[in-house]
Every structure is written in C-alpha cells, then in structure tokens.
Amino acid sequence: MASAAPPTPALSLRDVVALSGRFPLLAGVDLEVDTGEVVLVEGPNGAGKTSLLRVAAGLVPVTSGRLTVLGLDPERYRTAVRRRVGMLAHASHLYDDLNVRENVRFAVRAAGADPGRIGPACERLGLTGRLLRTSAAKLSAGQRRRVALAVLVARAPDLWLLDEPHAGLDASARSLLDELIGEAVATGATVVVASHEPELLEPLADRSVTVNGGRVTGERSIRSPAPDVPIRAVGSAERAAGPPVERVVHVA
Amino acid sequence: MTSTVVTERSDDRRRGDGADPARTGGPRNGPPALSRGTVLATRVVGVAAVVGVAFTVWLGLWVTPPDKVQGNLVRLVYIHPGVAWVALYLAFGLAAVASLLYLWPRTRSLFWDRLAAAAVEVGVVFNVCTLISGSIWGRPTWGVWWAWDARLTSTAALLVLFLGYMALRRVPAEPEVRAKRSAFAALFAALDVPIVHFSVVWWKTLHQGATVLNANLSPTIHGSMAWTLLLGFVALTLVFVWMLLVRYRIGVLEDWVGSGELDLALRERQAEGIAPPTASAVVLPGPPVPSETPAGREVPREIAEVAQ
Amino acid sequence: MWRDAALVAGKDLRIEARSKVALSQVAPFGIVALGLFAFALGPARAPMVSGAPGLFWVAVLFSTVLAIQRSVSVESADGARDGLRLSGLDPAGLFLGKALAVAAQLVVLELVLTVGVVLLYGAAVKTVWLIAAACLLGTVGLAAAGTLYGALSAGIRVRETLLPFLLLPVVTPILLAGTRIWQAGLAGGTPSDATPWLHLLLAFDAVYLAVGVVVYGPIQEAT
C-alpha cells in the first residue's frame, strides 16, 4: 500500500514518566507500536513492564511526556479509548459472589460490547456447562485467567495489552491463547505482551523491546517487516526532539 | 493532527506543576527561596498582628466601660465574634475557594492545595477558640457550659468537618492524589455547611414545646466599644493571615523534602537500567548513557548529570 | 448513563442476593443497636417512645456506614475497581448504580427497623406517608453522600475508621430532618411542621446527587 501518510500508530509513548507516589514506575519511555503489530515486552522483575501496560491502558496517569493510544489522548477521550483497549492483568477483576457467566456478562456489557458474542467466546475458552454456573470464588488461577480471556475475546478490542498471559495456564490453554492472539491480529488488532518467558511468544511476535529501570533499553526485530511497511529510523524528523534510544537491531 | 494539539495542552498543564517551587527541589539545591517581598510582608503582618492584639487587649480590658446588663462579661465581644468571623467565614471560605481552584483544571496548582490545607489547620485553631470563648460567655448567661445554641453547634459541626479534612490529609499519598482527595472532601464539606446550618437553626427554633434559650450573646454596641470591636476584628484577621503564611511556608518545605526524595528515586531507578541493581541505596556511576540532555526538562537533567 | 447505572445496580444487588450480607449482618446490627438504646434508656417505656424517632435514625446512620463499607469492599477484591475503570463505564452511571443499590438495601433495612421500633419501643405510627417520605428522601441522601465518601476513601487502608468519621458529620442534617418528620408522623402532627424538613431533605438529596454525578469520575481517576 503506497499511502502518502504513515498509518497512525496504535500506541505511542514519548519520554513518558509515570509516578506512583514518590516512586517512578516509568522513567522516560519511548515506544511506538504500529497497528497490527505484535510487540513483546521483556525485562527483569521490577523493570516496569506491568507499569508500561498499565499506563497504556490508562490506569496510571502520565506525569510528563506524551501518550497517544489509538490516535487519541487517553485523558481527553477516556471512555472512547477504554472501550477499545482490553487488558489482561495479573488480577482477573472478577466478583467472587457471581458465577462465571454473570461475571463475563457484566464485564462485556460494562464495556459496551455486543452481548451476543459472550456465548461463542465462552465456548472458545472452554467455559461450558457446569463451569459457567460455578461461582468465581471457587475457580483456580488458570480458570480465572480463562474467564478474563473470554471477556477479552468477546469484547474484541483494537488494542490488546497482555501482562504475563501464559502464567498459570496449562499447555492446552497456552496454545489456545496463541491461537487467539493470532486471530486477533488477523482481524486488525494490535497486541502488546509483557512476559518473563519471551521464548514462548517469539513465534507470534514481530518485535521485542526490553524494558529496564523504567525505560526502554533495547529493541530487536523478530520478524522482518513486510516490504511495504515504512521502517522507523532513529532520529527521524518526528523524533528529533527526543533523546535517541539505544537500539540493537538485528534480524532473527 | 488533533491529537498533537490536545496532548500538548495537557502537557503544559502537567508542566505547570514543574514550575512549582517545591518540585525543583532536591538535596542538590537549597529549599525554595522566599522572595524578599514575602519575608517583609510576613514580618509586617506579624508585627501588626501583635500590636493590634495588644491594643485590643488594652482597650478591651481597661479602657472600654462594662455593659449595663452583662457587666464585665461583655468584654468577650471583642474576641468571640472576631475569632468566629475568622473561623467560620475567612478560614472556611478561603479553604473552600482554594479547593475549588485546585479542582478547576485551568487553575490547578499545588499552591491552592497547600493554601487550603493551611487555612483549614489555622481555621481549626480559631474554631476551637470560638467554641471556648462562646462557652465561657454562655456559662454565666445560660448557666451551663454548652446549651446547644444554634450558632455554636454549627461551629462545632464545622470543626468536625475540618478535623475530617485533616485526618484525610494525613493519609500517606503522593501530593497530587492527596490534593485531589482533600479538595473533594473540602468541596463536600462546603456544600454541607449551609445545609447543616439551616438544619441546626431550625432544630432550635422550629422545635415546639422546648425552651428556646435566648442565646443572645450580642449586646448593643456603641461608642468606644464599637471601635474596639472593629480593632479586634482587624487584629484577629492579621493573626490569621500571619499564621496562614507561616503554615503555608511549612507546607512548601515539607513538599520540598518529599520531592528531593523523588529526584533521588528517579536517578536510582534509571541506574537500575544502566548497572545491575545492588542492595545499597547509593547511586552507582554506570557506563555513560548515549542520550543527549534535552533542554527544558528538569527530570532528565538530573540523569545526564549522573551519567557524567 | 442510565444504562450503565442499571447495569451496576443490578450487579451489586445480585452480589447482595448471593452473599446476603446486608440481610444477615447489617439489618441485625441495626436491631442490635435498637436494643442497645433500649438498655441505655430503659427500662421505663417513656424515654424510649419519646426518643424513638431519633434512635431510629441513629440506628439507620450507623447501619448506613456498614452498608457503604460493604459497597466499597465489593470492588476491592481482585482489582475489580481497576476492572470498572478499564471497562469504560460512564462514571456518573457507576455512581448512580452503586448509590441505587445501597439505597435499595437501606430501604429494606429501614422497613425492618421501623417494625423494630414499633414492636420494641411501642411507638405508634399515625401518619404513614410522612414516615415513608422521610425514609425515602433520607435514604437517597444517605446513599448519595455515602457512595461519594466511599469512593473518596476507597483506596485508603484505614478506610474502616476514617469513613465513619467523614460521613457521619456530613449526614447530620438527615438525622435532624428525619427525626423531626418522624416526630410529626408518630404524634400525628400537622404536616406543616414537617414541610421545611422535607424541603431540607430534598435540597440535600439534590445537592449530593448532582455533585456525585459530576465528580465521581475524577475521584475514581485520582485515587
């Protein structure tokens, strides 16, 4: 596609600093994720991977720097952005007193998504029969994850933010998750995944960024970009104002 | 692109706090300096307050005559309405307005938050003085220390709301969160005060069958009493302003100490990315980070200094 | 906004239907409070009867604190508060929904306590609509102000002790108004005694509902 203007990135952070009390979660992050990309975020514990996702989700306010999600300012267009962004966090946001079906139903309707998608999504995630009527308090961690995933699938957001999605899932659930990511990308969604085990996700990812000390300290390309996708060069006109981030680019 | 325009505006809003004196702090620089004008103004107000109070005391206790009905007890009129005016209208009004200004995005600045907090704290002092002076005045008049007089009860209600505000402020949180929380609490309290006032007044006056105590603490004022009363108002207002300025300054210093820790934490956080994290809290000089020092941003300036 | 409010209210009430906390804990607490008052004032009937309106409303106020605490703590498990924010629910709808759910529980509670007051204190209800009006209007105000303060203190660890201290002084007008209206209702007095108090309750409700709808979103994001 030889279009004149580059497509709007799904997620764009420019020197973003985010604080929690006195502690800087992000200390100046530069990151751009194009629509339809699958980006892997790696880094040691406490590096800021989860914080990066939370900032992108709009849960943590940005103290300085510029954040654009799906082309919009998340503080100004809060509801619009949140309805199109889906996050799979460590916590599953479930209500213990309600059963699986009620939890999924509430979450999907709260996000303004089509309730008709709930049935197929639950089936896809293997949430059927007795499991649907089980109260959330009785679920195992892996099952809670699956419920949260079902909500995500039913909502079909444009931007998926997954925080350690493979944690707590058995092998079959993991392969199911990989399928779901693939399907999401095929429908045009963008996926950003934070993980301790990047090897598991490399088959799916286009790119990997390393986060350390609250900043993006490295980046590598996993899958070579398609010929018609413009390559982002360091120091392009747009980025002249910001500090160049150290990059190691090699083709896997 | 519209998003550019929008985000830059929100950037400016955030940077507006960067100009806040307490946030450019840190152990590197000294505490935010007071302009000479501020120091002079504080001194002048302080001296004027002391002089005013001294005059009021002299006039009130010795020069003015005792009242026909209340005798020497009437001398409380030089204090009680004055502290009441400060506590109920000046302090509370200031706190409410400052909180609103903090909440309004265009005027948001931690200055208003600190001002509101200072006003509330000093207001508590004056509020307690109001209650004590009112109680002392009421004792001989009513025969009891507390007669649930409408105005004093409303004052007590305001005191409790003030104390709630201060309790909320004591919860550890970052300055912006604390400021927002306190501002909302002040807003809710401000909306409640007129309702409480009316309900208490009606409680006393609309109640059938109960003895409505004639809590007429206001005697007729004339001559030298009027001037002394006015002087008392002015003197007490000056006392409030002086205490407010001092308390505000303390708030600035507290926040400055806190933000110094922030800069340290920011440097340490980035050092994690450069050098392997160690157990000690000392910032290790790591290998130079290939980043230019961007102009006009206070945070990265500290990083560049560390990297060199 | 109303759609979101209905959704959230439905969710909270469904949780209550499952867990039955308000029914099995808050309402009995209210009855216990009435009993404590009886012990404090009795054994003669007279002080209890004359104090019945006020004691009823004090019991309601204390129970409201519990109900609000419960409403807030439902969201604190498993990061549900984050989930609500992430879903893009209209914050005004969220406020109204939670307030509606609390109000529904309070109405049931007040029904129970009214029966309690009639049975235990021997109070006789003369003008039913006055009693009902006081309860309904008072409930709306309690639910609105309570939900607001609940949100304000949601992330605080000392919420259990802070919330009563913040909320109870603010809702004293409801106590005063409710008591006066109940006195008129129990004594069969003329409604004109109660009219200014009814207006007061209406004003309180209007103020806190309006403020809550506007301000709940910023509070959520800030804390």
Image: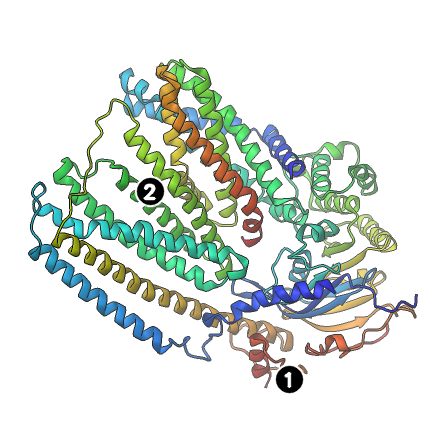
* Residue A226 place in picture, x, y as percent: 91, 68
Kindly identify which residue carries mark 1.
Answer: B288
Which residue is rendered at x = 13% and y = 38% of the image?
B141
* Residue B238 place in picture, x, y as percent: 26, 62
Kindly identify which residue carries mark 2.
Answer: B157
> With C168 as the anchor, is B223 left or right in this view?
left
Towards the viewer: A106 or C167: C167
**Which chain is disc 2 placed on?**
B
Quadrant of the rendering where the N terminus of chain C is positioned: top right
**Other-residue count near label 2 (Cα within 10 Å), few / some / many at <14 / 14–19 / ≥20:** some
Q: Tell me the kind of residue under disc 2.
A: Ala
Question: Does B260 sit above or below residue A130?
Answer: below
How far apart, in angstroms, are the residues tagged by discs 2 and 1?
60 Å
Picture quadrant of residue B69: top left
Q: Tell me the kind of residue under disc 1.
A: Pro
Picture quadrant of residue B203: top left
